[in-house]
Image (cartoon, rainbow, N blue to C red):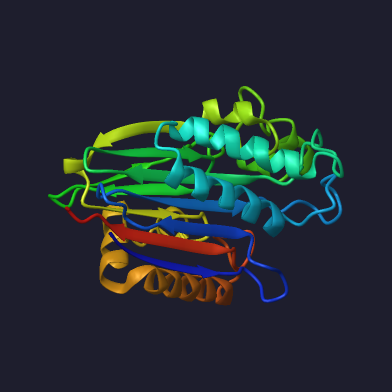
Amino acid sequence: MRSEVASLPGSPERPNEDWVATVPSSSDGGGALVLLDGVTPPVGDDGCVHTVPWFTARLGGALTELSGSRRDMSLSEILSLAIRRTADAHRDTCDLSHVRTPQATVVLARWDGVRVEHLVLSDSVLLLEAPDGTVRAVVDDRLDRVPDEVRRSLEATDRLRNRAGGFFTAAADPAVAARAVAGTTPRAEVRALAALTDGASRWVELFGEGDWADCFGVLREEGPAGLLRRVRALEADDARVGGPRRWKLHDDATAVYAELWDR
C-alpha cells in the first residue's frame, strides 16, 4: 500500500475537526483507512465539556486500533464498539443525550488479499477505482435529501438528526452503526481508493469541476494536497463574486488516497 494524506482547517482561528489515519499493510497484503469529519455545534450548545477534536481523536483512535486488530469483526461492529468506547470516556461528565453531543461523519475501508470492505455514514465520500480506471463513489445521501430551507435552521435539522426518516452521524449511540452504508468488493476489482470529507468533495459536489473519476485523476496525479489547493482556489474565486455557491468560505478539508499493491 502507498498512501498520501492532506488536511486543511477551515479557519486559522479554529482547530481542524477532521481526523484521518491509515493502517499500514500487513503480512496478508491488507490495510485500512479511517476518515472522520467532526460536526461543529453552536458554541457552548452541545451538553459536552470536551471539544469536537477531542471526540474525533477518541473515536478515530478506537476505529484505527480496531480496524487493524479485530479482523474477526465487521466494520459495522467495529464502529459500534468504537462509539461505545468513546461514549464511556465522557459519559460521567457530559450529557450524551443532547441532540448536538459531539459527533462525526465516518468513512472506513479495510482490505486484504481477498476483499475490500467499506462503510460510510453521513456526507463524507469513499471512492473505489477499478483496474480499468472506473471509479465508484460510495455515499450516504440522506443528509442531501434534507431540503435546503430545513438545513438552514438548527432546530429543524435537529429534529432529523439521528432519527428515522432523517440522517445519521456517529455520536453516542452504538446502534447507529447499523444505519451506515456498508458492503464488500472483491479485492481484484479495486486497485486504489480515496476518501474525502465534504470540504474536499466540494470540487465535485459544489463547484462541479468534474465527476468522481476526474477527481480521482487529480488525486492520482497531484495527490490529496493538490486537490485541496484546487478547492481553496475555487473558494477564493467564488468569494470574489459574492459567494453564491457556498454558505461559508472554507470548511475543514481532508483527503486520503491509497494504492493497493499486490503481495
Picture coordinates of residue 177, whole percent (x, y): 55, 31
Q: Is residue 133 left or right of residue 52?
A: left
Q: Is residue 150 left or right of residue 98?
A: left
Q: Quadrant of the N terminus?
A: bottom left
- Give the total number of marks visible in the rendering: 0
Picture coordinates of residue 25, whole percent (x, y): 31, 55
Q: Is residue 45 left or right of residue 143?
A: right
Residue 183 is drawn in which quadrant?
top left
**Viewer can see residue 129:** yes
Q: Of all residues shown, which one is farthest toward the left?
A: 132
Observer-nearest of 14 and 261: 261
The residue under the point 43% across, 40% down is 139
Is residue 185 positioned above or below 199 on the image?
Answer: above
**Viewer can see residue 201:** no
The residue under the point 63% across, 30% down is 174
Picture coordinates of residue 7, whole percent (x, y): 51, 68
Residue 223 is drawn in which quadrant?
bottom left
The residue under the point 80% across, 39% down is 91
Q: Of all residues shown, which one is farthest toward the top?
A: 164
Observer-nearest of 225 and 65: 65
Picture coordinates of residue 198, whole percent (x, y): 51, 54
The residue under the point 85% across, 49% down is 45
Q: Is residue 1 left or right of residue 72?
A: left
